[in-house]
Amino acid sequence: MLLKKEKGGFSVSLCQQRKPDDLIINMKPRLKILDRYLTLWIFLAMFIGVISGYLFPGIATFWESLKATPDSTTNIPIAIGLILMMYPPLAKVKYEELGGVFRNIKILGLSLIQNWIIGPVLMFALAIIFFKLFPGKDNANLPYMYGIIMIGLARCIAMVIVWNDLAEGDCEYCAAIVGMNSLFIYMFTNTGGSEWFRKIAKPFITGLFAW
């Protein structure tokens, strides 16, 4: 029963009471504790790795021994872990729909601008600024500057796939963009690509040092 206020008094109207069964609550299951606190686990793993390497320097030699060959840069346990981490999200991708993704020039163009213009330029600027502020004795911090520049060129792939899956993002768009970034990384970091990049960047870096 519902009372409604009207001019000159109140009117009484009947309304049907909803049963509890009629109330449908759309509740999504919460993330598992491993997924919910993934950022915390990442920082914790980094902290443990740094502290372990500082307290037990022999750990670095042990991890180096787990490479496929002495000249290789691929650590076998890490490679296996990355595959296990990326396989479940990539198994959800409908690869037959990737053609439509690559026809969306706006999304792909925006991704390329963010990943290969804004990101590298920003990291390059940060590398130069911090090296000018903290060059170290006899330019001892120069390798750190190179590392920051390379981070700007190395797009994250595995974690992007995992974060997109946790956020229930579009699997097809994620796979397409990650695939493009992988190709660009190969172009810029293989022997020919890195040599080409070094020839272009070296004069510019030398000029900034002079400044």
Image (cartoon, grey):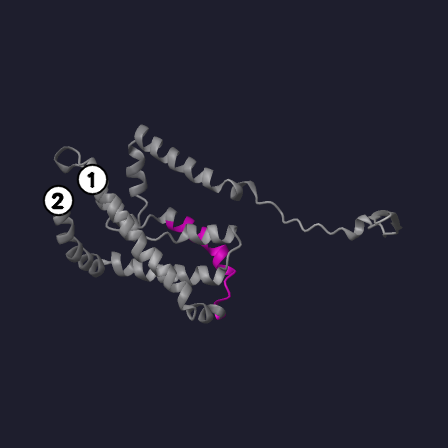
Residue 86: give x, y in percent of width and height: 45, 54
Dot 2 alpha-carbon crowd within 10 angstroms: few under 14, some 14 to 19, many 20 or more: few
Quick check: can you spot residue 69? Answer: no
Q: Residue farthest to the left? A: 210
Q: Which residues are magenta?
A: 79-96
198 inside magenta stretch: no
Identify the element where label 2 is drawn.
Answer: loop
80 inside magenta stretch: yes
Q: Name the foreground residue: 191 vs 109.
A: 109
Give left or right: position of 51 versus 142.
Answer: right
- Find disc 2 in the rendering and name its residue: 211
- Find disc 1 in the rendering and name its residue: 131
153 w.r.t. 33: above or below: below
Looking at the rendered structure, the kind of residue marked 1 is: Phe
Residue 50: give x, y in percent of width and height: 34, 34
Instruction: Indicate which disc, 2 or 1, sits on the residue closer to the N terminus.
Output: 1
Residue 80: give x, y in percent of width and height: 41, 50
Separation (CA) of disc 2 from disc 1: 12 Å
Residue at the image position 43 percent from the left and 68 percent from the top: 104
Give left or right: position of 30 versus 91.
Answer: right
Residue at the image position 15 percent from the left and 57 percent from the top: 199
Identify the element where label 1 is drawn.
Answer: helix
Residue 137: give x, y in percent of width and height: 14, 32
Give left or right: position of 73 versus 97.
Answer: left
